[in-house]
Image (cartoon, rainbow, N blue to C red):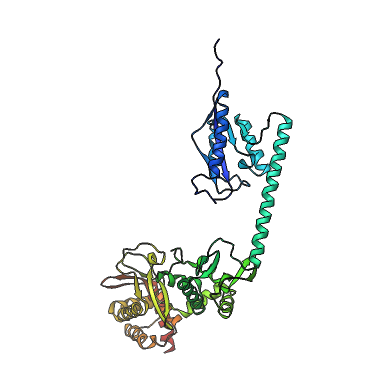
């Protein structure tokens, strides 16, 4: 008598644990679940059950969602026809949501996969078995929701008492004995950021300054504008514990005084566009958009304050963005480069070539104007320059200059042909007035 052939059933063991606590132990909860499932599969060897070598372990993932890496891998293998039986220790290890479990069972049925719970015996092929499964899942979902409510209530009560309940540790603090403790070196940086924002009034400009000074967060990241706003609006620096928008007195010490906080918040309540205009007016940049470094990349205006004094620079874009830059000139003093450009521009305006070009541009528009009159008008720009407002100086520079290339050994200016024509038009008004 021949022994009937038994079809081999490929069994995948799935394990899950909601938290990461204890996963670093030599024998953890996932191992215990797998051992129980492996023993059950071994007991069904006569039925052709064979355990797959692949491990489907989700440590630190909630059963209330299907967004779990091992579960996704398991479902992909089921869709590919590599699994015949899914074995779990308990039903709630696979899912704690009735709707999610219904979706999983739908995939199981479509692919002809059997689902087995080691500690809960039932048969889903009968109506009573399906009812039992739904009841068990309902209790699993109810248990998950009750646990969630308890945790939320505990967190809310703890925050009302000002306790630290974990999560992202803000710059300026360290966690010690489950409490926030001031980190003096980082706290000094936080205070300096608040104080400098009062003077600058612009998160964009302040972020550029901090980037140029290589000031980073406690995680080693560059402090950009988004990070600055998060720091400037974080009420934890006032010694408060915030929960769902409501602030309570915290157990930790404050880093910022209420007076400094109120001044900063009054600036933040203003329109960003108004603050940007004020910042640009306070720190004029004659060569903005015109100056390019030796590598051909633009150099943007930046500034910093030390000892109550303002220092202005033009910085290469790569440095501002935190990129590696091989340029021999990464930062240059704004006062020095602007003075050099103005001196060179004055010399160009006095040169015969520019005088003739301006006279020719003015000829069709101003009848009777002579080359000598044009030369005299251009020469008069020298003593008048220092009396012009910064905005007017910037307008003239932007009108006349097309591009400034900063070289290792000097400057190269390109004038605008149309700019000379505009100068000629303004000279026409001067000529008529004379």
Q: Indicate the quadrant containing the N terminus: top left, top right, bottom left or bottom right.
A: top right
**Across the whole image, how many numbered discs are drawn on residues?**
0
Query: Looking at the image, is 327 positioned above or below residue 54?
Result: below
Q: Nearer the viewer, residue 256 or 203?
A: 256
Quadrant for residue 389, please give it. Answer: bottom left
Q: Residue at 31% of width from left, 77% of height from top?
A: 354
> Where residue 344 sits: x, y (%)?
31, 78
Quadrant for residue 350, please give it. Answer: bottom left
Quadrant for residue 253, please give it. Answer: bottom right
> Where residue 257 sits: x, y (%)?
56, 78
> Where residue 181 sits: x, y (%)?
52, 69
Q: Could you tell whether 101 is left or right of 5 in the image?
A: right
Residue with the most extreme bottom position: 434
Residue 233 seen in this snapshot: no
> Where residue 402 sits: x, y (%)?
37, 71
Q: Nearer the viewer, residue 420 or 225?
A: 225
Q: Could you tell whether 63 is left or right of 51 in the image?
A: right
Q: Indicate the quadrant containing the C terminus: top left, top right, bottom left or bottom right.
A: bottom left
Q: Nearer the viewer, residue 164 or 434?
A: 164
Residue with the most extreme left position: 409
Residue 277 seen in this snapshot: yes
């Amino acid at each position: 008598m021949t022994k009937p052939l038994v079809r081999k059933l490929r069994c995948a063991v799935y394990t899950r644990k909601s938290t990461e606590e204890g996963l670093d132990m030599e024998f953890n909860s996932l191992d215990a679940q797998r051992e129980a499932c492996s023993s059950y599969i071994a007991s069904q060897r006569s039925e052709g059950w064979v355990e797959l070598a692949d491990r489907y372990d989700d440590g630190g993932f909630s059963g209330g969602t299907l967004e779990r890496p091992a579960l996704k891998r398991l479902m992909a293998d089921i869709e590919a026809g590599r699994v015949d039986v899914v074995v779990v220790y308990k039903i709630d290890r696979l899912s704690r949501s009735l709707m999610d479990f219904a979706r999983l069972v739908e995939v199981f049925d479509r692919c002809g996969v059997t689902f087995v719970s080691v500690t809960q015996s039932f048969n889903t092929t009968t109506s009573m078995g399906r009812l039992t499964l739904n009841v068990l899942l309902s209790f699993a979902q109810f248990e998950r929701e009750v646990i969630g409510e308890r945790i939320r209530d505990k967190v809310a009560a703890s925050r009302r008492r000002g306790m630290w309940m974990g999560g992202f540790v803000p710059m300026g603090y360290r966690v010690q004995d489950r409490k926030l403790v001031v980190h003096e070196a980082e706290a000094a940086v936080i205070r300096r950021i608040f104080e400098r924002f009062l003077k600058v009034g612009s998160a964009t400009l302040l972020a550029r300054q901090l980037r140029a000074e290589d000031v980073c967060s406690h995680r080693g990241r560059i402090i950009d504008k988004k990070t600055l706003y998060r720091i400037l609006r974080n009420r934890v620096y006032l010694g408060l514990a915030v929960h769902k928008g409501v602030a309570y007195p915290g157990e930790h010490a404050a880093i910022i005084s209420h007076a400094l906080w109120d001044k900063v918040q009054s600036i933040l309540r203003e329109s960003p566009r108004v603050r940007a205009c004020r910042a640009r007016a306070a720190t004029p940049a004659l060569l903005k958009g015109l100056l390019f470094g030796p590598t051909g990349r633009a150099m943007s205006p930046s500034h910093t304050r030390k000892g109550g004094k303002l220092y202005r620079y033009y910085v290469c874009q790569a440095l501002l963005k935190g990129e590696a830059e091989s340029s021999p000139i990464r930062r240059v003093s704004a006062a020095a480069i602007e003075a050099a450009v103005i001196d060179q521009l004055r010399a160009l305006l006095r040169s015969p070539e520019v005088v003739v070009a301006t006279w020719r541009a003015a000829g069709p528009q101003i009848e009777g104007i002579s080359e000598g009159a044009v030369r005299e008008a251009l020469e008069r720009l020298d003593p008048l320059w220092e009396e012009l407002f910064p905005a007017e100086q910037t307008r003239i520079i932007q009108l006349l200059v097309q591009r400034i290339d900063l070289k290792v050994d000097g400057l190269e200016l390109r004038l605008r042909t149309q700019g000379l024509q505009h100068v000629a038009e303004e000279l026409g008004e001067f000529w008529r007035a004379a």
